[in-house]
Amino acid sequence: MFNSIRGTVGGKDGEALYLLTGGVEWEIAMPANDIENLPSAGGECRVFTWLYHREDQMRLFGFAGEVRRNTFLELIKVEGIGPKGALKIMGGIGQEDLEHTLEAGDLARLEAVPGLGKKTAQRMLLSLKGKLAHAPADSASASPYSDLVEALAEMGYEKRSAAEAVAKAEAALPPGLAPAEREKQLFKEAIVYLSGS
């Protein structure tokens, strides 16, 4: 239904992001560490989404990248983990750490994650080992401009370096640019950083 939403950050509140786009402010539930990686109020970002729809409620969940969304979708397949629990787990452990922990079968590390008890951690190990390892565990997966990072990677730049260059370029941009102009400037400035000019 919705793959992603691009807009202006209206505010952040714990595990909720408020994103303004086309005259509508969306309330999007997100892992806390994904929210931290997004620009502050007034900044532009793209959030990958998933709509939770039940008879009695609808809620929009968001993620800083497609890898994070895929992790969430795998987590909610595990017995005993619902959408809220998956957000809490993802907010308590980074993507790379989670992938490594699952592959290593490190039950003690999983149990230390807020919101995870021993039984749920054991079910996670059984259900998810080998399912997240294919995901690229790099800073590109947490970038709100993952499409720009991908474009730079296709030009031959290393993904992690591309993500860092985009982040540096974003910090240097003046506020108030239109989304299309902002993306264009980010791309140009990121290339400047990557070329070492």
Image: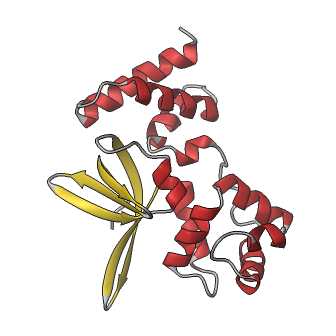
User: Image check: 85 left or right of 101?
Assistant: left
Q: Position of residue 118 (x, y in %)?
A: 76, 83
Q: Is residue 6 visible?
A: yes
User: Image check: 52 left or right of 139?
Assistant: left
| Residue shown at the point (48%, 30%) measured from the top left | 166
Which residue is nearer to you in this view: 96 or 147? 96
How many numbered markers are drawn? 0
| Residue shown at the point (54%, 47%) measured from the top left | 142
Q: Position of residue 12 (x, y in %)?
A: 37, 56
Q: Is residue 133 visible?
A: no
Q: Quadrant of residue 133?
A: bottom right
Q: Position of residue 55 (x, y in %)?
A: 32, 91
| Residue shown at the point (64%, 30%) measured from the top left | 158
Residue 96 against residue 153 in the figure, above or below:
below
Residue 127 against residue 68 in the figure, above or below:
below
| Residue shown at the point (56%, 19%) measured from the top left | 194
> Which quadrant is home to the N terminus?
bottom left
Which residue is nearer to you in this view: 172 or 22? 172
Q: Quadrant of residue 54?
A: bottom left
Residue most toward the bottom? 55
Q: Position of residue 79 (x, y in %)?
A: 63, 87
